[in-house]
Amino acid sequence: MSSLRNAVSRRAHKERAQPESKKKFGLLEKHKDYVERAKAYHKEETLRAFFRNPDQFNFKMTKTRTVDGVHKLESRANKYNPEELLRMKTQDIGYIFQKVQSEKKKTEKLTATLHSLDNWPSSRYVYFAEDRKEAREIQSRPKSGKMPVSEDIPDHIKRKTAGSYRELEGRRKRVNELEKIYMDMAMQKELQVLTSTFVCYNTTTTPLTKPIDVHKECLDKYSRTLDQ
C-alpha cells in the first residue's frame, strides 16, 4: 500500500511569492534567508561577549556592590516609609472587605434560591367520587403530610441541586476565611498605627533613655481600647 502511495504523483508545494502590495518593501524573506541572518546575529553576539570590557559602565552598578568578587544588590527592605506601608495596608483591607461583602451577597442569594426550591408548594389534588360510598372510601384513606408524587424528580435536577448545595457550603467557608483575614489585617493595621504614634511621641517629646518594647506597649494599649 505504501509503494502505491509513493507511486502516485504528488503536488509540488512552492513557497508563496511576494504579494503585489508588499513588493515596495523588497524581497520576501525565505526560511533559508532567516537561517543565515540568525547565524550572523549570534556570531556577532559571541564576538561582543568575547571582547566585552568588564569595567564598562552600567546603570546597575549604582545599585550593586561587590563582596568577594560577587555582585550583590542593595537591600530593599526599607523601600517604603511607614506612611506608604499604612496606605497600602488600608487598600488591602478595603479589597478584602469588598470581597467579604460580595461573597455574603452571593451566599444570601443562593440560600434564598435553595430555600424556595425546598419549600415549593405541592400541587393540590381534587378527587371526584361517583357516589357517597366512594367518597367515604376516599375520606377514609390515610392522610400523609404530602400527596403522593406521580413522577420522580429528574436526575439532572438532583445533580444541579446537589451542586448548588456544595457551592453554598464552599462560599460559606470562603466567607469565614475572608472574615478571619480581614480581622487579622485590621489588627495589624491598628498595631501599626499605634506603633508609629508611640514612637513619634517618645522621640519628639520624651528622649529615649532605655529600650522600650513597642510591640508590648501597643498590645496593651490596643487591649485597653477594646475594653472601653
Image (spheres, rainbow, N blue to C red):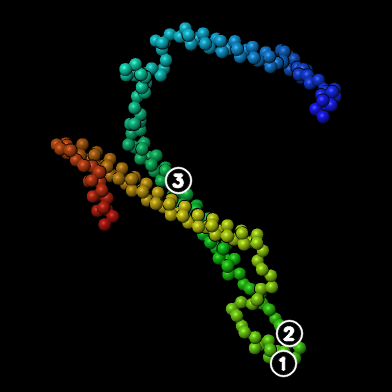
Residue lying at 24% horizontally and 39% vertically, measured from the top left? 199
**Lower sequence index among marks 1 and 3:** 3
Residue 27 drawn above or below residue 129: above
SS for callout 1: helix
Spatial distance from mark 2 to mark 1, Cα to Cα? 12 Å
SS for callout 2: loop
Q: Toward the viewer: 31 or 1?
A: 1
Residue lying at 68% horizontally and 14% vertically, measured from the top left? 32
Q: Position of residue 95 (x, y in %)?
A: 45, 45
Q: Can you tell which quarter of the image residue 143 is in?
A: bottom right
| Quadrant holding the C terminus | bottom left
Residue 35 drawn above or below residue 80: above
Q: Is residue 134 visible?
A: yes
Q: Position of residue 35 (x, y in %)?
A: 64, 14
Label 3 Cα neighbours within 10 Å, binned few <14 / some 14-19 / many ≥20: few
Q: Amino acid at mark 3?
A: Tyr
Q: Amino acid at mark 2?
A: Phe
Relative to 96, 45 lies left or right: right
Q: Position of residue 10 (x, y in %)?
A: 83, 23
Q: Amino acid at mark 1?
A: Lys
Q: Which residue is mark 3?
A: 95
Q: Which residue is mark 1?
A: 133
Q: Which residue is mark 2?
A: 128
SS for callout 3: helix
Residue 204 drawn above or below residue 100: above
Q: Position of residue 1 (x, y in %)?
A: 82, 29
Spatial distance from mark 3 to mark 2, Cα to Cα? 63 Å
Q: Nearer the viewer, mark 1 or mark 3?
A: 1
